Protein backbone atom coordinates (compact mmCIF):
# COMPACT_ATOMS: atom_id res chain seq x y z
CA UNK A 1 0.00 0.00 0.00
CA UNK A 2 2.81 2.37 0.93
CA UNK A 3 4.58 1.56 -2.32
CA UNK A 4 1.47 2.42 -4.33
CA UNK A 5 1.10 5.73 -2.49
CA UNK A 6 4.73 6.59 -3.13
CA UNK A 7 4.39 5.73 -6.82
CA UNK A 8 1.25 7.86 -7.09
CA UNK A 9 2.94 10.85 -5.43
CA UNK A 10 6.01 10.49 -7.67
CA UNK A 11 3.76 10.33 -10.74
CA UNK A 12 1.91 13.50 -9.72
CA UNK A 13 5.22 15.23 -8.99
CA UNK A 14 6.53 14.39 -12.48
CA UNK A 15 3.39 15.75 -14.10
CA UNK A 16 3.65 18.90 -11.98
CA UNK A 17 7.21 19.50 -13.17
CA UNK A 18 6.17 18.95 -16.78
CA UNK A 19 3.38 21.50 -16.35
CA UNK A 20 5.76 24.03 -14.76
CA UNK A 21 8.16 23.67 -17.71
CA UNK A 22 5.37 24.42 -20.17
CA UNK A 23 4.15 27.36 -18.09
CA UNK A 24 7.66 28.85 -18.23
CA UNK A 25 7.68 28.34 -22.00
CA UNK A 26 4.32 30.09 -22.33
CA UNK A 27 5.33 33.04 -20.13
CA UNK A 28 8.47 33.70 -22.15
CA UNK A 29 6.54 33.29 -25.40
CA UNK A 30 3.93 35.82 -24.26
CA UNK A 31 6.62 38.37 -23.33
CA UNK A 32 8.27 37.90 -26.74
CA UNK A 33 5.00 38.41 -28.62
CA UNK A 34 4.21 41.35 -26.34
CA UNK A 35 7.47 43.03 -27.28
CA UNK A 36 6.97 42.33 -31.01
CA UNK A 37 3.44 43.75 -31.08
CA UNK A 38 4.65 46.76 -29.10
CA UNK A 39 7.38 47.45 -31.67
CA UNK A 40 5.28 46.94 -34.81
CA UNK A 41 1.96 48.09 -33.34
CA UNK A 42 0.08 45.36 -35.22
CA UNK A 43 -2.52 43.25 -33.35
CA UNK A 44 -2.27 40.51 -35.98
CA UNK A 45 1.10 39.59 -34.54
CA UNK A 46 -0.73 38.11 -31.56
CA UNK A 47 -1.27 35.12 -33.85
CA UNK A 48 2.24 34.13 -32.85
CA UNK A 49 0.64 32.95 -29.60
CA UNK A 50 -1.01 30.00 -31.39
CA UNK A 51 1.89 27.56 -30.68
CA UNK A 52 1.61 28.48 -27.00
CA UNK A 53 -2.03 27.43 -27.03
CA UNK A 54 -0.99 24.16 -28.66
CA UNK A 55 1.44 23.61 -25.78
CA UNK A 56 -1.51 23.11 -23.44
CA UNK A 57 -3.10 20.56 -25.77
CA UNK A 58 0.27 18.86 -26.23
CA UNK A 59 0.59 18.47 -22.45
CA UNK A 60 -2.63 16.46 -22.20
CA UNK A 61 -1.86 14.40 -25.32
CA UNK A 62 1.65 13.55 -24.12
CA UNK A 63 0.42 12.72 -20.63
CA UNK A 64 -2.35 10.45 -21.85
CA UNK A 65 -0.57 8.74 -24.77
CA UNK A 66 2.85 8.01 -23.27
CA UNK A 67 3.68 5.77 -20.35
CA UNK A 68 6.81 7.72 -19.33
CA UNK A 69 5.30 11.19 -19.79
CA UNK A 70 7.56 11.99 -22.75
CA UNK A 71 8.15 10.83 -26.30
CA UNK A 72 11.25 8.77 -26.99
CA UNK A 73 13.00 10.54 -29.87
CA UNK A 74 11.31 13.92 -30.25
CA UNK A 75 10.15 16.54 -27.72
CA UNK A 76 7.07 18.33 -29.17
CA UNK A 77 6.78 20.77 -26.25
CA UNK A 78 10.28 22.14 -26.93
CA UNK A 79 9.51 22.33 -30.65
CA UNK A 80 6.33 24.35 -30.05
CA UNK A 81 8.22 26.64 -27.68
CA UNK A 82 10.92 27.29 -30.29
CA UNK A 83 8.29 27.90 -32.98
CA UNK A 84 6.52 30.45 -30.76
CA UNK A 85 9.63 32.46 -29.81
CA UNK A 86 12.02 32.32 -32.77
CA UNK A 87 9.76 34.23 -35.24
CA UNK A 88 9.48 37.04 -32.68
CA UNK A 89 13.28 37.23 -32.36
CA UNK A 90 13.55 37.40 -36.17
CA UNK A 91 11.11 40.34 -36.25
CA UNK A 92 12.99 42.13 -33.48
CA UNK A 93 16.29 41.69 -35.30
CA UNK A 94 14.70 43.11 -38.44
CA UNK A 95 13.51 46.12 -36.43
CA UNK A 96 17.07 46.64 -35.19
CA UNK A 97 18.34 46.47 -38.79
CA UNK A 98 15.71 48.96 -39.94
CA UNK A 99 16.53 51.37 -37.08
CA UNK A 100 20.24 51.26 -37.94
CA UNK A 101 19.52 51.91 -41.61
CA UNK A 102 17.31 54.88 -40.73
CA UNK A 103 19.90 56.31 -38.35
CA UNK A 104 22.60 55.90 -41.02
CA UNK A 105 20.55 57.68 -43.68
CA UNK A 106 19.38 60.52 -41.41
CA UNK A 107 22.88 61.35 -40.17
CA UNK A 108 24.62 60.69 -43.49
CA UNK A 109 26.92 58.00 -42.10
CA UNK A 110 28.87 55.58 -44.25
CA UNK A 111 28.63 52.67 -41.81
CA UNK A 112 26.06 51.48 -39.29
CA UNK A 113 26.69 51.91 -35.58
CA UNK A 114 25.55 50.08 -32.46
CA UNK A 115 24.04 52.81 -30.29
CA UNK A 116 21.31 54.06 -32.59
CA UNK A 117 18.16 53.32 -30.58
CA UNK A 118 16.94 54.77 -27.30
CA UNK A 119 15.93 52.51 -24.44
CA UNK A 120 12.24 51.56 -24.39
CA UNK A 121 10.01 49.47 -22.17
CA UNK A 122 6.90 47.38 -22.77
CA UNK A 123 3.59 49.15 -23.29
CA UNK A 124 1.08 48.40 -20.55
CA UNK A 125 -1.76 46.02 -21.50
CA UNK A 126 -4.90 46.10 -19.36
CA UNK A 127 -2.93 47.85 -16.62
CA UNK A 128 -0.18 45.20 -16.65
CA UNK A 129 3.37 46.34 -17.37
CA UNK A 130 6.95 45.16 -16.90
CA UNK A 131 9.30 47.86 -15.53
CA UNK A 132 12.23 47.01 -17.80
CA UNK A 133 13.77 49.42 -20.28
CA UNK A 134 16.23 48.17 -22.87
CA UNK A 135 17.36 49.22 -26.31
CA UNK A 136 16.07 47.34 -29.34
CA UNK A 137 19.15 45.16 -29.78
CA UNK A 138 19.28 44.48 -26.02
CA UNK A 139 15.65 43.31 -26.10
CA UNK A 140 16.44 40.84 -28.89
CA UNK A 141 19.57 39.61 -27.11
CA UNK A 142 17.82 39.26 -23.74
CA UNK A 143 14.95 37.25 -25.21
CA UNK A 144 17.43 35.02 -27.04
CA UNK A 145 19.41 34.40 -23.85
CA UNK A 146 16.27 33.56 -21.87
CA UNK A 147 15.22 31.20 -24.68
CA UNK A 148 18.43 29.19 -24.38
CA UNK A 149 18.31 29.15 -20.57
CA UNK A 150 14.70 27.94 -20.51
CA UNK A 151 15.48 25.22 -23.05
CA UNK A 152 17.95 23.75 -20.54
CA UNK A 153 15.76 24.27 -17.48
CA UNK A 154 12.72 22.95 -19.33
CA UNK A 155 14.54 19.77 -20.35
CA UNK A 156 15.54 19.32 -16.69
CA UNK A 157 11.93 19.69 -15.52
CA UNK A 158 10.34 17.58 -18.23
CA UNK A 159 9.99 13.83 -17.57
CA UNK A 160 13.00 11.70 -18.41
CA UNK A 161 10.99 9.37 -20.64
CA UNK A 162 13.20 6.48 -21.74
CA UNK A 163 16.35 8.26 -20.49
CA UNK A 164 18.19 7.10 -17.40
CA UNK A 165 19.36 9.63 -14.81
CA UNK A 166 22.90 9.26 -16.08
CA UNK A 167 21.78 9.95 -19.65
CA UNK A 168 19.70 12.93 -18.54
CA UNK A 169 22.68 14.52 -16.78
CA UNK A 170 24.74 13.85 -19.91
CA UNK A 171 22.03 15.42 -22.06
CA UNK A 172 21.88 18.58 -19.92
CA UNK A 173 25.64 19.04 -20.19
CA UNK A 174 25.40 18.65 -23.97
CA UNK A 175 22.58 21.22 -24.05
CA UNK A 176 24.69 23.72 -22.10
CA UNK A 177 27.46 23.40 -24.68
CA UNK A 178 25.01 23.74 -27.57
CA UNK A 179 23.42 26.83 -26.00
CA UNK A 180 26.79 28.50 -25.43
CA UNK A 181 27.91 27.85 -29.01
CA UNK A 182 24.60 29.07 -30.47
CA UNK A 183 24.62 32.26 -28.43
CA UNK A 184 28.23 32.98 -29.27
CA UNK A 185 27.60 32.42 -32.99
CA UNK A 186 24.64 34.80 -33.24
CA UNK A 187 26.15 37.39 -30.89
CA UNK A 188 29.57 37.63 -32.50
CA UNK A 189 28.56 37.39 -36.16
CA UNK A 190 25.65 39.85 -35.94
CA UNK A 191 27.96 42.46 -34.40
CA UNK A 192 30.41 42.43 -37.28
CA UNK A 193 30.46 45.83 -39.08
CA UNK A 194 29.95 44.11 -42.45
CA UNK A 195 26.83 42.38 -41.11
CA UNK A 196 25.11 45.22 -39.24
CA UNK A 197 23.39 46.69 -42.32
CA UNK A 198 23.46 43.67 -44.62
CA UNK A 199 19.97 42.16 -44.54
CA UNK A 200 20.94 39.06 -46.51
CA UNK A 201 23.72 38.14 -44.08
CA UNK A 202 21.43 38.79 -41.11
CA UNK A 203 18.80 36.44 -42.55
CA UNK A 204 21.38 33.72 -43.27
CA UNK A 205 22.86 33.97 -39.77
CA UNK A 206 19.43 33.85 -38.13
CA UNK A 207 18.46 30.89 -40.31
CA UNK A 208 21.57 28.94 -39.29
CA UNK A 209 21.00 29.86 -35.64
CA UNK A 210 17.35 28.77 -35.81
CA UNK A 211 18.35 25.54 -37.55
CA UNK A 212 20.79 24.72 -34.74
CA UNK A 213 18.00 25.03 -32.15
CA UNK A 214 16.38 21.89 -33.56
CA UNK A 215 18.96 19.91 -31.58
CA UNK A 216 17.00 20.71 -28.43
CA UNK A 217 13.99 18.85 -29.87
CA UNK A 218 15.98 15.63 -30.20
CA UNK A 219 16.25 13.49 -27.09
CA UNK A 220 17.92 10.13 -27.51
CA UNK A 221 20.27 11.23 -30.30
CA UNK A 222 22.09 13.62 -27.97
CA UNK A 223 23.35 10.87 -25.68
CA UNK A 224 24.86 7.48 -26.32
CA UNK A 225 23.72 4.47 -24.36
CA UNK A 226 26.46 1.88 -23.83
CA UNK A 227 25.90 -1.26 -25.88
CA UNK A 228 26.47 -4.50 -23.92
CA UNK A 229 29.16 -6.81 -25.23
CA UNK A 230 27.84 -10.35 -25.54
CA UNK A 231 30.20 -13.19 -24.71
CA UNK A 232 28.36 -15.71 -26.88
CA UNK A 233 25.78 -15.61 -29.57
CA UNK A 234 25.65 -14.71 -33.21
CA UNK A 235 26.74 -11.28 -34.36
CA UNK A 236 25.56 -9.73 -37.59
CA UNK A 237 27.89 -7.37 -39.43
CA UNK A 238 26.33 -3.99 -40.05
CA UNK A 239 27.67 -1.04 -42.01
CA UNK A 240 29.89 1.09 -39.80
CA UNK A 241 28.57 -0.24 -36.52
CA UNK A 242 24.97 0.25 -37.54
CA UNK A 243 24.17 3.74 -38.76
CA UNK A 244 21.23 3.93 -36.35
CA UNK A 245 23.29 3.64 -33.17
CA UNK A 246 22.62 6.52 -30.78
CA UNK A 247 26.18 7.83 -30.63
CA UNK A 248 26.57 7.80 -34.42
CA UNK A 249 23.32 9.74 -34.79
CA UNK A 250 24.41 12.19 -32.09
CA UNK A 251 27.66 12.94 -33.88
CA UNK A 252 25.99 13.25 -37.27
CA UNK A 253 23.28 15.59 -35.97
CA UNK A 254 25.84 17.76 -34.21
CA UNK A 255 27.84 18.16 -37.43
CA UNK A 256 24.82 18.73 -39.70
CA UNK A 257 22.80 21.03 -37.43
CA UNK A 258 25.55 23.09 -35.80
CA UNK A 259 29.26 22.63 -36.37
CA UNK A 260 29.34 22.46 -40.18
CA UNK A 261 26.92 25.40 -40.75
CA UNK A 262 28.75 27.56 -38.19
CA UNK A 263 32.11 26.80 -39.79
CA UNK A 264 30.78 27.44 -43.30
CA UNK A 265 29.31 30.82 -42.33
CA UNK A 266 32.49 31.97 -40.64
CA UNK A 267 34.65 30.92 -43.58
CA UNK A 268 32.26 32.73 -45.93
CA UNK A 269 32.58 35.95 -43.92
CA UNK A 270 36.36 35.64 -43.85
CA UNK A 271 36.75 34.93 -47.58
CA UNK A 272 33.96 37.04 -49.08
CA UNK A 273 33.89 40.07 -46.75
CA UNK A 274 37.45 39.89 -45.36
CA UNK A 275 36.16 39.69 -41.79
CA UNK A 276 39.40 38.71 -40.09
CA UNK A 277 39.85 39.46 -36.41
CA UNK A 278 41.02 37.66 -33.30
CA UNK A 279 37.62 36.30 -32.24
CA UNK A 280 36.68 35.20 -35.76
CA UNK A 281 39.96 33.32 -36.20
CA UNK A 282 39.65 31.66 -32.80
CA UNK A 283 36.08 30.40 -33.29
CA UNK A 284 36.81 29.31 -36.86
CA UNK A 285 39.71 27.20 -35.62
CA UNK A 286 37.51 25.83 -32.85
CA UNK A 287 34.76 24.82 -35.28
CA UNK A 288 37.32 23.21 -37.59
CA UNK A 289 38.79 21.11 -34.78
CA UNK A 290 35.33 20.11 -33.55
CA UNK A 291 34.26 18.93 -37.02
CA UNK A 292 37.48 16.95 -37.47
CA UNK A 293 37.14 15.36 -34.03
CA UNK A 294 33.52 14.45 -34.73
CA UNK A 295 34.50 12.58 -37.90
CA UNK A 296 37.45 11.01 -36.08
CA UNK A 297 35.09 9.78 -33.36
CA UNK A 298 32.73 8.28 -35.93
CA UNK A 299 35.65 6.46 -37.56
CA UNK A 300 36.74 5.07 -34.19
CA UNK A 301 33.23 3.79 -33.49
CA UNK A 302 33.14 2.09 -36.89
CA UNK A 303 36.49 0.38 -36.32
CA UNK A 304 35.52 -0.75 -32.81
CA UNK A 305 32.33 -2.31 -34.14
CA UNK A 306 34.27 -4.16 -36.82
CA UNK A 307 36.71 -5.44 -34.20
CA UNK A 308 33.83 -6.68 -32.04
CA UNK A 309 32.37 -8.54 -35.02
CA UNK A 310 35.71 -10.16 -35.83
CA UNK A 311 36.12 -11.25 -32.19
CA UNK A 312 32.68 -12.83 -32.22
CA UNK A 313 33.34 -14.66 -35.49
CA UNK A 314 36.79 -15.96 -34.53
CA UNK A 315 35.64 -17.59 -31.30
CA UNK A 316 37.64 -17.75 -28.06
CA UNK A 317 41.02 -17.69 -29.83
CA UNK A 318 42.08 -15.10 -32.42
CA UNK A 319 45.62 -14.72 -33.76
CA UNK A 320 46.95 -16.77 -30.87
CA UNK A 321 45.22 -14.55 -28.27
CA UNK A 322 42.47 -15.81 -26.03
CA UNK A 323 39.12 -14.05 -25.75
CA UNK A 324 38.76 -14.35 -21.96
CA UNK A 325 34.98 -14.05 -21.65
CA UNK A 326 34.23 -16.62 -24.34
CA UNK A 327 36.98 -18.96 -23.09
CA UNK A 328 35.55 -18.99 -19.55
CA UNK A 329 32.07 -19.59 -20.94
CA UNK A 330 33.39 -22.53 -22.98
CA UNK A 331 35.12 -24.06 -19.91
CA UNK A 332 31.95 -23.71 -17.84
CA UNK A 333 29.95 -25.54 -20.49
CA UNK A 334 32.54 -28.34 -20.59
CA UNK A 335 32.53 -28.67 -16.79
CA UNK A 336 28.75 -28.98 -16.77
CA UNK A 337 28.90 -31.70 -19.40
CA UNK A 338 31.43 -33.68 -17.30
CA UNK A 339 29.91 -33.21 -13.83
CA UNK A 340 26.25 -33.85 -14.63
CA UNK A 341 26.73 -37.47 -15.87
CA UNK A 342 28.73 -38.32 -12.71
CA UNK A 343 25.86 -37.15 -10.54
CA UNK A 344 23.42 -39.24 -12.56
CA UNK A 345 25.62 -42.35 -12.21
CA UNK A 346 25.75 -41.93 -8.43
CA UNK A 347 21.98 -41.75 -8.28
CA UNK A 348 21.65 -45.01 -10.28
CA UNK A 349 24.02 -46.80 -7.85
Image: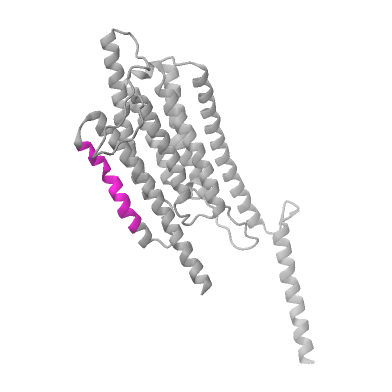
Number of numbered discs present? Answer: 0
Of the pair 81 and 37, the residue shown nearer to us: 37
User: Residue 250: percent from the left, percent from the top?
Assistant: 49, 44
- With 106 as the anchor, is 343 left or right in this view? right
Q: Quadrant of residue 205?
A: top left
What colour scheme has been applied to the protein in the rendered image? one colour
Q: Residue at left 35%, top 28%?
A: 133
Q: Residue at left 42%, top 28%?
A: 186
Of the pair 170 and 41, the residue shown nearer to us: 41
Query: Is residue 57 inside the magenta stretch?
Result: yes
- Would you place residue 10 above or below residue 30 in this image? below
Q: Quadrant of residue 329?
A: bottom right
| Most frequent secondary structure within the magenta stretch | helix
Q: Is residue 209 visible?
A: no
User: Residue 40: percent from the left, percent from the top?
Assistant: 23, 29
Query: Is residue 274 inside the magenta stretch?
Result: no
- Would you place residue 30 above or below residue 197 in this image? below
Q: Is residue 112 visible?
A: yes
Q: Start and end of the magenta stretch?
A: 44-60
- With 46 as the anchor, is 215 left or right in this view? right
- With 128 as the anchor, is 166 left or right in this view? right
Of the pair 288 and 315, the residue shown nearer to us: 288
- Would you place residue 110 above or below residue 130 in this image? above
Residue at the limit of the structure toward the bottom, as seen here = 349
User: Residue 71: percent from the left, percent from the top?
Assistant: 41, 55
Q: Residue at left 61%, top 53%?
A: 309
User: Residue 104: percent from the left, percent from the top?
Assistant: 30, 12
Amino acid sequence: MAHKCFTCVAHIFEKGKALIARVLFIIHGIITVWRVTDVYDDPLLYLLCIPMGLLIAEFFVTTCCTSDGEWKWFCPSVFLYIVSVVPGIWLLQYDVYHARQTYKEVHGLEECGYDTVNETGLRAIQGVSIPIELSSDEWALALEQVLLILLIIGRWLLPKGALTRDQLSQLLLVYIGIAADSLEFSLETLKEPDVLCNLLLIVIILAIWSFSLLQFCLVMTAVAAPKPRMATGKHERTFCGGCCENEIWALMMSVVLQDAPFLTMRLYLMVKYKVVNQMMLFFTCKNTMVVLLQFYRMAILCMNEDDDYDDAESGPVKNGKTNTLEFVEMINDDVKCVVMPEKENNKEK
